[in-house]
Image: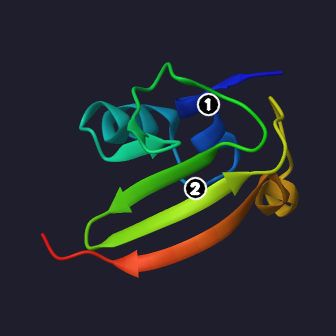
Amino acid sequence: MRLRLDKFLKVSRLIRRRTLAKDVADQGRVAVNGKKAKAGTKVSVGDEIAIQFGQKLVTVQVLSLSEVVKKGDAKTLYKVLKEERVNS
């Protein structure tokens, strides 16, 4: 199974809304496996996603994919590999 990047970011609650996830990806602030990614990029289990939130860069690994997940289970979809501050 593969899932669109914007959909995964919303379902995993890394980003609250799909439209915001799309905007962040289209601004070039998201990378999948080291490459800049657009909202429609397909993600698979095992992929690494790096997201820049202002001064913070968060890298996560995709553990599982789901179209719908309960709020309490959202964190089971990914594992945070690292969080670092970025100086722009």
The image position of residue 15, as x and y in percent, is 52, 51
Q: In this picture, is 41 found above or below 78?
A: above
Q: Residue at x 26, y 73 (%)?
A: 55
Q: Amino acid at mark 1?
A: Lys
Bin the neighbour count of mark 2 within 10 Å (Cα to Cα): few under 14, some 14-19, many 20 and up: some
Give the mark, 2 or 1, whose residue is nearer the N terminus: 1
- Numbered mark located on residue 57 in the image: none
Residue hosting label 2: 14
x and y percentages locating residue 39 in the rendered image = 45, 26
**Vertical arrangement, residue 27 with respect to residue 48, above or below:** above
Q: Give the x, y percent position of residue 34.
A: 44, 45
Count of numbered circles in the view: 2
Q: Which mark is residue 7?
A: 1
Give the left or right position of residue 9, taking residue 87 as reference: right
Residue closer to the observer: 72 or 54? 54
Colour theme: rainbow
Q: Quadrant of the N terminus?
A: top right
Circles 2 and 1 in contact, beta carbons < 8 Å: no
Amino acid carrying label 2: it is Leu
Residue furthest bottom as drawn: 85
Residue reaching furthest to the left = 88
Residue 50 location (% of width, % of height)? 47, 54
Q: Residues within 10 Å of mark 1 (few under 14, many from 20)?
A: many
Label 1: which secondary element: helix
- Within the image, what quadrant is residue 87 found in? bottom left
**Residue drawn where x is 63% and y is 70% of the image:** 81
Residue 3 image-quadrant placement: top right
Q: CA distance from mark 2 to mark 1?
A: 10 Å
Residue appearing at x 80%, y 29% in the figure: 67
Numbered disc 2: secondary structure = loop
Image point 77% across, 62% down: which residue? 75
Quarter holding the C terminus is bottom left
